[in-house]
Amino acid sequence: MRSSIRIASGQGFWGDWLLAPVLQVARGPIDYLVMDYLAEVTMSILQKQRLRDPQLGYARDLITVFRDIAPFLRERPIRLITNGGGMNPLAAAEQLVSVARQLELRGFRIGVVLGDDLMPRIDELLESGYEFPHLETGQPLREIRDRLLSANVYFGALPIVEALRQGAQVVVTGRTTDTGLTLAPMIYEFGWSEQDYDLLAAGVIAGHILECGAQASGGNFLGNWEAIDLVEPGFPIVEAYPDGTFVVTKHEGTGGIVTRETVTEQLLYEIGDPREYITPECIADFTSIQLEDLGANRVRVFGARGRPPTPYYKVSATYSAGYMAVGTLVYSAPNALERARQADFILRERLRRLGLTFEEIRTEFVGYNACHGPLAKPIDPNEVMLRVAVRAADYVTVDRFTREIAPLILTGPPGVTGFSGGRPKPSEVVAYFPTLIPKELVQPEIHILEV
């Protein structure tokens, strides 16, 4: 058993700073680099891409990053773990193999976690009597089966642990929990059992701190953010120990900051009930966490408590829910807000007279109420963007809407100064359907690809 390991966050979402992984492997010692790419909306985007091209469906930034950091992975014993495989982890891994061969990384082993994709089995599971009820509404999945696009299980750390045991230097997964990426190397290196719930909870908490990248090390920080150097922020690193304690830090010489406050903000991010943070491995009690600011960008985390997990995996399903389009016009003149409001009225009245029916039509005045809605205080902006979005079941209705935006330039209120991007195009709406599946109904699969 190792006395400690250093796990570094390299990405907090698909589209995060591409230089971050390079800095993590180049600026100091680490043992693992974890890169979290997935969110529910990300899975929807990746599924739409895979529907257009069966060879896509993964975070293509992963391939770019791997090419940049591969020389460091060759020279140092650093392992990479990522859920960037998205909807198509095998295709992503095959691309990584291709890059590794180009860079002559002979003997490299890339592990792939499969089995999270339920689509090939969905009818079989439904016929067996399992309803897949929506977590919030209780709606059974069979009611949207004819529009179902994807259904993926949230696996956790254990399949990654198995890939590491089989010698993988890189592990690529699909819809794995964000926390599982960090918990896995801790289980693997320290020999924790599946019943060590306090230790597993500590690893889950460490993963939660790392999952959003620089949000734990000064980015998006509500405190004294003006004084933080974010030109080249150091992404967070966890120094983990076998007893479940760990220290959150970053590489010396990088920007950003790690304090009790930055770590606390990330701990509170998207957790729901803090006493029941549910993962496949355990239920972590965030109210048990204790923090000690050691200074010099080091925060010690200890005291985590955990309980046995539920008998279910979460399932992220998506289905086709019609079409949408968004149109914008910018007004820049005295009474800009009133001009934009009048344009919105004219647009809606024209749509009504055309007999068009939408499931939803939403107007925002960017610069006034796009973020705060009815809570926005009255102001008199000298410029405002009118943004109108519509959603309907059929393409034709949405397409007709897109043809009514541009005419407002010459047939609406004066003062239009911006109409960028041309006429908007309808796009398919992919809706989210969260549900559960008993763990015994699904098994992960581990494949090792040799370079």
Image (cartoon, helix red, strand yellow):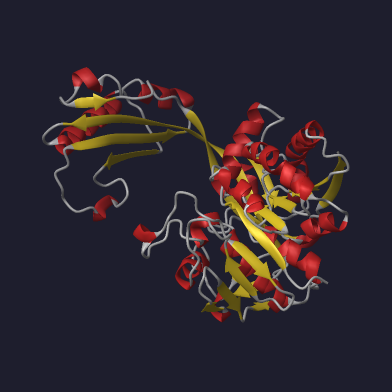
248 w.r.t. 219: above or below: below
217 w.r.t. 20: above or below: below
Residue drawn at 72 percent across, 30 percent down: 55
Residue 412, by quadrant, is: top left
- Closest to the observer: 431 or 146? 431
Q: Is residue 159 left or right of residue 49?
A: right
Q: Is residue 105 left or right of residue 333?
A: right
Residue drawn at 73 percent across, 38 percent down: 92
189 w.r.t. 288: above or below: above
Where residue 60 appears, x then y in whole percent? 64, 36
> Which residue is farthest front?
253
* Residue 280 visible (yes or no): no
Residue drawn at 68 percent across, 32 percent down: 56
Quadrant in which the C terminus is drawn: top right
Where residue 302 appears, x then y in whole percent? 61, 79
Q: Is residue 358 left or right of residue 188?
A: left
397 w.r.t. 209: above or below: above
Q: Is residue 133 left or right of residue 195?
A: left
- Closest to the observer: 7 or 434? 7
* Residue 244 visible (yes or no): yes
Number of disc labels = 0
- Closest to the observer: 347 or 129? 347
Where residue 57 appears, x then y in whole percent? 66, 36
Where residue 17 appears, x then y in whole percent? 53, 45
Residue 431, by quadrant, is: top right
Quadrant in which the N terminus is drawn: bottom right
